[in-house]
């Protein structure tokens, strides 16, 4: 009997029973990792922060992602509000920079930082790509001789203080060696390009700013003082917890809604999550670090600390393997990566890998089911990593015409020449097959993320399992701090969850289904919602830097 596409793709299916079991296994695994893993569920020097009160001045925010760089200047005028005043535009990180040295990457970052600061001093703000004249002598003069910096770095790292960190193995196509100090690399990259560069202030008052601090015309750009380093999930959680208007990153106003946000999610080139956990959920050696905020006895305190889960790496794999979620296609993909076995959950869910996974499945179907030879397939389609998740999102998934999609695919992946009777061509039927494969890969990814989110919230105690499903081994008590009706919000950002058609909707449907089938609402939690936080990495970096500045000012 001929193999149908539906039966061929059956290994990708996550039915309700398997999804429920996966969620429970994830929760058990996460509890174990939180308690004893040295590579995952890493405590940070950050507790759930309060809203900033007042800030007057400038901070520089740097957001280094898996495929992009963003640099922005944020300013405050003595109120509980900060705004983007310069920069904010995307800068793609070239593949040769990723594959090079740490010094090369941070030189690239430093060059872009210098470009933003120079444009600000020139009086022309790019402000997210919209040039704005700022040459009024007011905000510009506040740049000063030293500029505080907040950094979001979307890779594994070990933090030694709020402003110091050491690189761990990176992944996402980056090959630089671990163990190097992030803060030192960043400052060195900036100094390389800032050294000796004159400011272009040309004023008649002798270049004295409004605060009376003299800066000589021709003086080099300001020194950078790193106030805070964090990862993208923490930054997104911080930004979502503090501010409303998620679609407007230029004006950040205090959040007034009653949602409780204790989980941050990134789903872009890579994936990760940050969760606010009680101290007692972590091994004592993790919480005894001098960099962590002081607290009472861990068994007594209700204080929470933000924990970088590094959810994607190998400690998360046992449930995926036990429940046979990892398919032969996933195994082939894993072996083709720079670090096989390093990030099993990321290989199944993130933007760097979904396109390649679809390509591998499609070629397997064509060769082993439809009996095409490799030589008869489009040569470009045979190139590893050529079919990107972005292409699937913007071309394949949005098409409503198989004929037009076939024309586009013929243009982008032309058939081999000369053609024969057995040469593959892009017929409407073949494009529908590709679309179906892409859709099934997307659905599985969305459901895996939804299951992981529910498991993390179970771990934190913010939601509870129904009595018949409560694991006997659980050490974490439910969070009973409030019985008022409320929503729990997951702050999210990233191109995959934001832009891939139906990804967000499928993820929310999965969260809804698992919450209502597995959990009670004894603590008044009515729903768990996904909340978009636009440019959370940039916002969060600025907010943490401001928080450290305000903290220092209060101590003086």
Image (cartoon, rainbow, N blue to C red):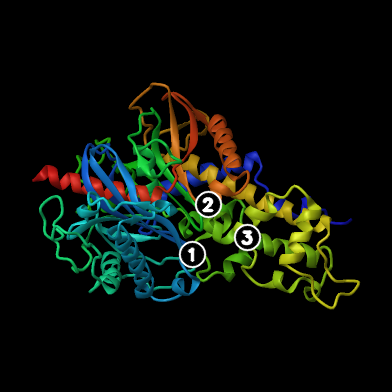
Looking at the image, tell me whether mark 1 or mark 3 is earlier in sequence order: 1
- Residue 42 x %, y %: 34, 53
How far apart, in angstroms, are the residues tagged by discs 2 and 3? 14 Å
The reply, left or right, for residue 529 in relation to residue 424 is left
* Quadrant in which the N terminus appears: bottom right
Q: Is residue 380 left or right of residue 255?
A: right
The secondary structure type at the circle numbered 3 is helix
Q: Is residue 380 positioned above or below 209 on the image?
A: below
User: Which callout, 2 or 3, points at the residue further toward the start of the chain?
Assistant: 3
Label 1 to label 2: alpha-carbon separation? 15 Å
* Disc sitting over residue 172 in the figure: 1
Q: Where, by quadrant of the figure, is residue 215 drawn? A: bottom left
Would you name the residue on which mark 2 appears? 495
Q: Which residue is rendered at x = 58% and y = 46% of the image? A: 446
Residue located at (65% from left, 53% from top) = 441
Callouts 1 and 2 close, C-beta under 8 Å = no
How crowded pointer 1 is (Cα within 10 Å; few <14, some 14-19, many 20+) is rated as many
Q: Residue furthest bottom?
A: 418
């Amino acid at each position: 009997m001929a193999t149908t596409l539906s039966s061929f793709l059956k290994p990708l299916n996550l039915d309700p029973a398997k999804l429920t079991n996966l969620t429970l296994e994830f929760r058990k695994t996460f509890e174990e990792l939180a308690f004893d893993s040295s590579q995952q569920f890493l405590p940070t020097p950050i507790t759930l922060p309060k809203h900033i009160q007042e800030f007057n001045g400038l901070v520089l925010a740097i957001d280094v992602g898996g495929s992009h760089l963003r640099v922005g200047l944020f300013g405050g005028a003595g109120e509980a509000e900060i705004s983007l005043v310069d920069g904010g535009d995307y800068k793609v990180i070239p593949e040769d920079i990723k594959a090079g040295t740490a010094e090369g990457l941070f030189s690239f970052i430093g060059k872009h930082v210098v470009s933003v600061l120079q444009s600000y001093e020139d009086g022309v703000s790019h402000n997210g790509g919209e040039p704005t004249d700022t040459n009024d002598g007011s905000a510009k003069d506040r740049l000063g001789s030293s500029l505080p910096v907040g950094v979001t770095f979307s890779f594994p790292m070990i933090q030694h203080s709020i402003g110091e960190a050491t690189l761990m193995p990176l992944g996402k196509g980056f090959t630089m060696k671990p163990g190097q100090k992030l803060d030192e690399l960043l400052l060195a990259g900036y100094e390389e390009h800032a050294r000796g560069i004159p400011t272009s202030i040309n004023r008649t008052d002798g270049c004295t700013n409004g605060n009376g601090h003299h800066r000589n015309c021709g003086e080099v750009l300001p020194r950078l003082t790193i106030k805070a380093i964090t990862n993208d999930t923490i930054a997104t959680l911080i930004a979502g917890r503090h501010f409303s208007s998620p679609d407007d990153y230029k004006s950040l106003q205090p959040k007034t809604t009653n949602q409780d946000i204790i989980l941050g999610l990134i789903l872009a080139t890579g994936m990760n999550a940050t969760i606010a956990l009680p101290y007692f959920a972590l091994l004592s050696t993790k919480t005894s670090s001098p960099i962590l905020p002081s607290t009472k006895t861990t068994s007594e305190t209700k204080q929470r600390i933000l924990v970088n889960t590094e959810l994607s790496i190998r400690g998360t794999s046992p449930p995926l393997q036990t429940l046979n979620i990892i398919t032969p296609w996933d195994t082939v993909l894993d072996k083709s990566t720079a670090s096989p076995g390093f990030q099993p959950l990321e290989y199944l869910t993130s933007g760097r890998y979904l396109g390649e996974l679809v390509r591998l499945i499609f070629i397997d179907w064509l060769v082993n089911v439809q009996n095409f030879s490799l030589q008869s397939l489009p040569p470009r389609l045979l190139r590893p990593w050529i079919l990107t998740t972005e292409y699937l999102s913007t071309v394949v998934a949005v098409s409503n015409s198989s004929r037009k999609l076939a024309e586009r695919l013929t243009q982008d992946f032309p058939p081999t020449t000369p053609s024969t009777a057995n040469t593959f061509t892009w017929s409407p039927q073949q494009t529908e097959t590709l679309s179906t494969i892409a859709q099934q890969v997307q659905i599985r990814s969305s459901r895996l993320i939804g299951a992981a989110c529910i498991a993390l919230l179970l771990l934190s105690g913010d939601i509870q399992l129904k009595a018949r499903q409560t694991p006997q081994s659980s050490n974490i008590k439910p969070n009973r701090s409030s019985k008022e009706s409320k929503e729990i919000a997951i702050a999210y950002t990233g191109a995959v969850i934001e832009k891939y058609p139906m990804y967000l909707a499928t993820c929310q449907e999965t969260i809804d289904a698992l919450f209502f089938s597995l959990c009670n609402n004894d603590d008044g939690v009515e729903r768990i919602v996904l909340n978009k936080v636009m440019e959370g990495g940039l916002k969060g970096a600025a907010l943490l830097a401001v928080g450290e500045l305000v903290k220092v000012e209060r101590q003086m």
